[in-house]
Amino acid sequence: SGAGENGLDTQPPGGPASASSSASSDSGSASERMPRKKDRSSPGREPGAPGSAEGGQTPEGRRTSRRKRAKVEYRDMDESLANLSEDEYYSEEERNAKAEKEKKVPPPPPQAQPEEENDSEPEEPSEGAAFQSRLPHDRMTSQEAACFPDIISGPQQTQKIFLFIRNRTLQLWLDNPKIQLTFEAALQQLEAPYNSDSMLVHRIHSYLERHGLINFGIYKRVKPLPAKKTGKVIIIGSGVSGLAAARQLQSFGMDVTLLEARDRVGGRVTFRKGLYDA
């Protein structure tokens, strides 16, 4: 009643003033409980200044690292190392140790040259002649064993002599296949002592010629065809195979008759020049 009399308005406890004071006290106590975040802005820049990134973020919102990366230039180092000589690359102690080590190691003794073996047997002919003739160079075939039973049942040295003469004869023919290789020419070009057994050389030469391993195809004959005919053969077709068979049989002394339905030879292989067909 006294306050009303003096013209002053009094507020009861718990009014607006007391509520604001209590709210400020509560916020102060909460701020004391929460730790403050450190200002991570770089020294010398105020927070919020242009170009500064608060909280480790750029103005665009991208997170960046505060750590500076050192730039190392390797080009000058590589060029300097590439131009170093061997003496500059090693230290003086390493060069001295290397020189002492080289002095301690004795030079290797000179190697004696191996003496050449002087064997009585000549070198074996190249295996290329037998390989080109589709024959093994180091053993006899079953067909050769059937034609030379005395050789295949004999000692190993006899078979080696046979193989040498056979391979050497094949090599002589392949060296010059345009001229007939006769028995006399083969015997003359064989090395000693393989030319001592002329009968064996003649048998091997006749075997190779009979089976078409030498003196086949188109070549110049040194000896004429045998005058005595040993048989008569009729060949049907004058193609490439028929002509080759007729020529080979004539060299064996056979009387050959060639039959052809067309007016030309050659079969499916033809050659035309002007008025002539072949």
Image: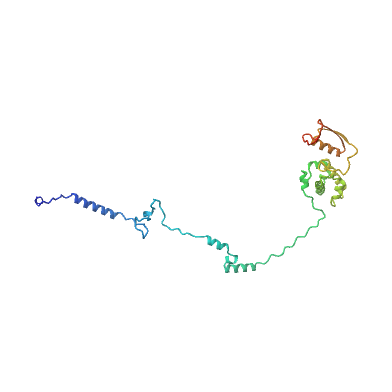
x and y, in percent, of residue 97 in the image: 60, 68
Which residue: 76% across, 47% down? Answer: 128
In the rendered picture of this protein, how many numbered marks are placed on residues?
0
* Left or right: 233 in relation to 70: right
x and y, in percent, of residue 22 in the image: 22, 52
Of all residues, the one furthest to the right in this rendering is: 228
x and y, in percent, of residue 33 in the image: 29, 54
Compared to residue 271, the image places residue 90 above or below, namely below
* Left or right: 121 in relation to 88: right
Compared to residue 33, the image places residue 166 above or below, namely above
- The image quadrant of residue 181 is top right
Front residue of 202/16: it is 16
Front residue of 135/20: it is 20
Front residue of 67/128: it is 67
Of all residues, the one furthest to the front in this rendering is: 274
x and y, in percent, of residue 146 in the image: 81, 41
Residue 201 visible to an observer of this rendering: yes
Compared to residue 100, the image places residue 152 above or below, namely above
Which residue: 28% across, 54% down? Answer: 31
Q: Which quarter shows the C terminus?
A: top right
- The image quadrant of residue 269 is top right
Which residue: 82% across, 36% down? Answer: 243
Its colouring scheme is: rainbow
* Left or right: 96 in relation to 243: left
Residue 148 visible to an observer of this rendering: no
